[in-house]
Each structure stands twice: as C-alpha cells, then as structure tokens.
C-alpha cells in the first residue's frame, strides 16, 4: 500500500509539473504578444429586443500567435490574472476600446455604449479608478458611455469593499453589468448589495431556453429578478430567432449573440452599424 502511495504522489507531481510548464509557456507567449502589439480587441453588438436598435458593444480581447493560431481568452485570461499581467493588459483594453468608441461616434454611431470586461484582479488594485479615469481622459470619452462588466467572483474582495468601489464607479456616471449571472455561487445573497445597471444572463441558460429543461426555468426567473432590483436584463449567446422571441416574451430587455453579429474588428463594426441604421 505504501509503494502505491509513493507511486501515486510521483505521478501527481509530474502532472503538476506539466501544468506549470504549460502555464509558464503561455504566460511568456502572452507577455511577448502584448509587448509586440499582437493582441487586439473585437467588438460584439448588443441589441434592444424591443426596438431592435444597437445599444452598445462589448469589447473582447483576442490573441493571435505568430503562426496565426488563436488562443481563446478562456485559456489565457486566467494565466494573465494569476501573474498580474491582466492589470496592464486590462488598462490597454480599456484605452483601446474607448478610443475605438470615439472613432465610431465620429463616424455617426450615435451614443453607443462600450462594455469592457474587468477582472476581479483589476478591481482589487488600489489604482483601478485612476486607470479608468486616465483612459477616459486620454480618449476624451464621457464616463456615461462606459460600462464595466464584472462577475460574481468580485465577492473575493469582500462585499463591503466591492459595494464602496461600485458606488465610486457609479458616481462617475459609469455603468456596471454583472456578467455570467447564475454560474457562480451565492449570487442571490449579495445581488441586492451590488448597485449594478445590467444583469447578463449566461449563455448556458439561453441555450436551454427552448428545451424545457431546468436552465429554461432559470432564465425565466432571472428576468423578473433583475427587474425587481432595478436592472436591465441582457441575454448572452442568443443564436436563433426562437431564443430571441422566447426572451422577448419573458420581458428580457436586450440580447447579444451570433444571431445578430459575431464579435468583429473595428473596421467591420463601423460599416455593420451604418447598415443597421439603414
Ligand atoms: P464573456 O464576457 O462571457 O464573453 C462572451 C463570450 O461569448 C465571448 O467569448 C463571445 O465571443 C462569446 N459569444 C458571444 N455570442 C455568442 C453566441 O451566440 N454563441 C456562442 N457560442 N458564443 C458567443 P470570448 O470572446 O471567447 O471570451 C471568453 C471570455 O473571456 C469572456 O466571456 C470573458 O470572461 C473573457 N474576456 C474576453 N475579453 C476580456 C477582457 O478584455 N478582459 C477580461 N478580464 N476578460 C475578457
Ligand atoms: Ca462579458
Ligand atoms: Ca458573459
Ligand atoms: Ca463567460
């Protein structure tokens, strides 16, 4: 039995070694890509289910390696968070997407909103608000065109700190969205303490909308819950008309997904918006 125990622990540490090397490789690659400006931002429109109008766009980070491969954000964001690199990259995403919004507005896009994902690691930085203020100043964009998308993982900061920070953010006129709602833990216990403007229903629940499964019931419950708390409700990952019309029937306010548009580079978004406006 003892032998087996040793064998197993050797096996596990070898595994950990592989994972660590992989992470280190990924982190170095990401740092290099960031330094050499090989990261870029794509934008996905957000649509009002009532009017059909585009109300905003979400900025999504992309990394294409030198050999033309895309590394998905779900793989490299955790590495960037653990290393702290997300702080510098996040500040860059903020500046880049606000600058893009300025370009779009100059091109006649109207008062579109820019939604930017922020990691809890960024939010926990004492300089976070200064970084946001600086990005707004540098790009000349008004605070009320910016929305910060946060997730339930901010709970690790402690609710007092989160509540204070969100109040500071909102006092500037910046909007806050709660992303991936329903996928984390303890959502309901602190939802009423997060002064947010928008609740984003995670794609997982939208996918099962027309299935009669439990996920469908959850989406049905999130809409009135968000409204009760004074928030707009936006459904993520809407891929077909059936989902869109079910969501509309539920009273969901807004939607985002491949049905309307995939995330696209700025050069494509301008023409896309112009065509939508007709
Ligand atoms: P998220 O914030 O929940 O972003 C939505 C994800 O769903 C995006 O994946 C988007 O491309 C994808 N999506 C949108 N519509 C559809 C659809 O109709 N069907 C399907 N199957 N997928 C759809 P993406 O771009 O791969 O991003 C993954 C995650 O990486 C994001 O999830 C977000 O958590 C994170 N992320 C992306 N950019 C940033 C960033 O700049 N900063 C931070 N902190 N996180 C980011
Ligand atoms: Ca998001
Ligand atoms: Ca999401
Ligand atoms: Ca997500």
Image: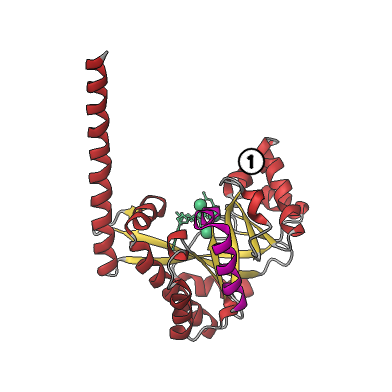
Question: Label 1, on which residue?
Answer: 208
- The mark total stands at 1
Q: Nearer the viewer, residue 53 or 181?
A: 181
Q: Position of residue 144 (x, y in %)?
A: 60, 78
Boundaries of the magenta span: 151-171
Q: From where the camera sits, is residue 278 visible?
A: no
Whether label 1 lies within 8 Å of ligand 1 gets the answer no
Q: Residue at x 63, y 47 (%)?
A: 206
Q: Is residue 6 left or right of residue 203?
A: left
Extreme residue in the top direction = 1
Question: How crowded is the residue under tag 1: few (<14 C-alpha within 10 Å), some, or many (20+)?
Answer: some
Q: Position of residue 76 (x, y in %)?
A: 35, 54
Q: Position of residue 228 (x, y in %)?
A: 77, 58
Q: Position of residue 118 (x, y in %)?
A: 48, 63
Look at the picture and state if 52 lies above or below 191: below
* 154 is within the stretch colored magenta: yes
Look at the picture and state if 140 lies above or below 15: below
Q: Is residue 104 left or right of residue 38?
A: right
Dominant secondary structure, magenta: helix
Q: Residue at x 22, y 28 (%)?
A: 10
Quarter of the image with the C terminus is bottom right
* 81 is within the stretch colored magenta: no
Q: From where the camera sits, is residue 171 visible?
A: yes
Q: Residue at x 65, y 63 (%)?
A: 198
Q: Secondary structure at mark 1?
A: loop
Quarter of the image with the N terminus is top left
Q: Quadrant of residue 29?
A: bottom left
């Amino acid at each position: 039995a003892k032998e087996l125990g040793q064998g197993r622990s050797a096996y596990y540490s070898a595994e950990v070694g592989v994972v660590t090397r992989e992470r280190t490789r990924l982190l170095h690659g990401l740092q290099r890509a960031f330094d050499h400006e090989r990261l870029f931002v794509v934008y996905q429109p957000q649509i009002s289910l009532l009017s059909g109008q585009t109300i905003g766009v979400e900025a999504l980070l992309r990394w294409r390696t030198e050999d033309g491969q895309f590394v998905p954000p779900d793989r490299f964001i955790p590495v960037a968070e653990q290393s702290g690199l997300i702080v510098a990259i996040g500040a860059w995403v903020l500046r880049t997407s606000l600058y893009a919004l300025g370009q779009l507005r100059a091109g006649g896009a109207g008062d579109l909103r820019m939604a930017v994902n922020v990691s809890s690691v960024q939010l926990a930085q004492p300089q976070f608000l200064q970084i946001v203020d600086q990005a707004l100043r540098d790009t000349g964009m008004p605070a009320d065109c910016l929305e910060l998308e946060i997730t339930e993982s901010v709970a690790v900061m402690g609710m007092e700190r989160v509540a204070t920070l969100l109040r500071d953010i909102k006092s500037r006129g910046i909007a806050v969205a709660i992303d991936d709602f329903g996928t984390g833990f303890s959502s309901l216990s602190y939802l009423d303490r997060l002064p947010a403007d928008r609740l984003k229903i995670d794609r997982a629940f939208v996918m099962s909308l027309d299935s009669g499964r439990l996920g469908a019931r959850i989406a049905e419950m999130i809409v009135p819950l968000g409204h009760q708390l004074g928030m707009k409700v936006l459904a993520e990952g809407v891929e077909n008309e059936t989902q869109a019309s079910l969501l509309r029937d539920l009273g969901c306010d807004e939607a985002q997904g491949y049905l309307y548009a995939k995330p696209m580079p700025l050069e494509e978004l301008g023409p896309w918006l112009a065509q939508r406006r007709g």
